[in-house]
Each structure stands twice: as C-alpha cells, then as structure tokens.
Amino acid sequence: MKKLFVILLSLITLAGCTSDRKCLILGTVSDSNLNGKRIFLVPVFHEDSLGVDSVVIMDNKFSFSRNEEFLADIRIDYHYRQNTENLLVITEPGTVNVVIDTVSSGGGTPQNDSLQVWKELIIRRNAELAKNRKDYSNFIRAGDSANAEIVKRHMQAVGEKFTLRTKAMADNLGSGTLYEFLMQRVPKK
C-alpha cells in the first residue's frame, strides 16, 4: 500500500511539473467577420506543416496550448488576413494574452512582455525614420544638401540607438528564446 501511495504521489508530482511548462495562448480578434476562419500558430524557424497548429475563431476568440518553448507567428488564414497584423509570440510557460487587429499585441509572460516592448520600439523607430525620410527627400528636392546631410546623420543615429536598445534588452535577458532572437537582430561587428 505504501508503494502504491509513493507511485501515485510521484505521478501527481510529475503531472504538476508538466502543467508548469504549459503555455496557454488566449486570443481575441476585433473583426467579427473572422469568426469561423482559421488562425495559425506557426513556428518561426520551422515553417513546415508538422509544427503548425491551427484553430477556428469562435465568438472573436481562440486559444492554443503548447508544452514546448519556441518563437511563433500567429496569423490569420491568408485568404482573410487583410487588415490584420501577424504577431510574434514565445510559447513560454504561462498564459499569453494576444489581440489580433490592425496593430496586434501580446503579453502576460516575461519574454512576451519584453517582446511587446521591443515591438513598440520598432513602431516608434519606424515612425521617426518615415518622417526623416520625407524631410530628407524634401531637402534633396530643394537642393539643400547641408540639411539633407543632417537628417541623414540623424537617421543613422536613430538606427544605432535602436540597435543599442535591442542589444541591451538581449543582454538583460541573458538567455532564452527571446535572447537568441534579439541577438540575431544585432549587427555583428
């Protein structure tokens, strides 16, 4: 009887450890026209059909459950994808809450919270660079090469600042899926 109790306790403990590693992605979509359509969880570095998971969106909601950690892209079926943005997520243990919309977002676990911060940095960088490119073009058209050069240097500084922030974020993480992903984005010198 004592052996049976030890075996049962071991199984319960093992089951508890397995559930601790589980990633639950709870998602919503803003467009009710997507109800009944498929949404996919696609491993970023292994886009073969064996690693892809999909579910049907019901009542503007969907969910995925995974036991292994990897970087993935959440995307709507390509036939219905217009006006939605794909979203990178990390299937780390815990609950990841995502919203798929024209600008998608996610968070709820440490790496996904950091990934969302990094995405917001990209959005701000891209907005600033878009304005700078317009200014640069206007200066070039006007024949003002001095101010065009100032704007060009500013654009380079914006890119360098983003790279430094990405590197600092990766260094702060130290290891893991997001660390590896960010380090791939930092130029090697």
Image: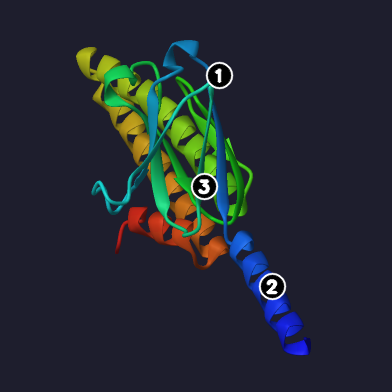
Residue 149 vs residue 127, the one in the foreground? 127
Query: Would you identify the image quadrant in which residue 6 lies?
Result: bottom right
Tell whether label 1 touches label 3 (CB within 8 Å).
no
Mark 3 vs mark 2: give the one in front. Answer: 2
From the viewer's perspective, is residue 65 above or below residue 104?
A: below
Q: Which residue corresponds to the image point at 44% horizontal and 11% vertical from the top-left?
A: 33
Q: SS at mark 1?
A: loop
Residue 49 vs residue 1, the one in the foreground? 1
From the viewer's perspective, is residue 19 above or below residue 121?
A: below
Tell whether label 1 touches label 2 (CB within 8 Å).
no
Task: Name the N-terminal-most of marks 3 and 1.
Answer: 1
Residue 59 numbered tag? 1
* Three-letter amino acid code of the residue under disc 2: Thr
Q: CA distance from mark 2 to mark 1?
A: 36 Å
Q: Which residue is mark 2?
A: 13
* Three-letter amino acid code of the residue under disc 1: Asp
Residue 156 vs residue 57, the one in the foreground? 57
Tell whether label 2 touches label 3 (CB within 8 Å).
no
Residue 129, given in percent of the width and then of the height, sits at 38, 29
Task: Name the N-terminal-most of marks 3 and 2.
Answer: 2
* Residue 183 shown left or right of residue 137 in the figure: right
Q: SS at mark 2?
A: helix
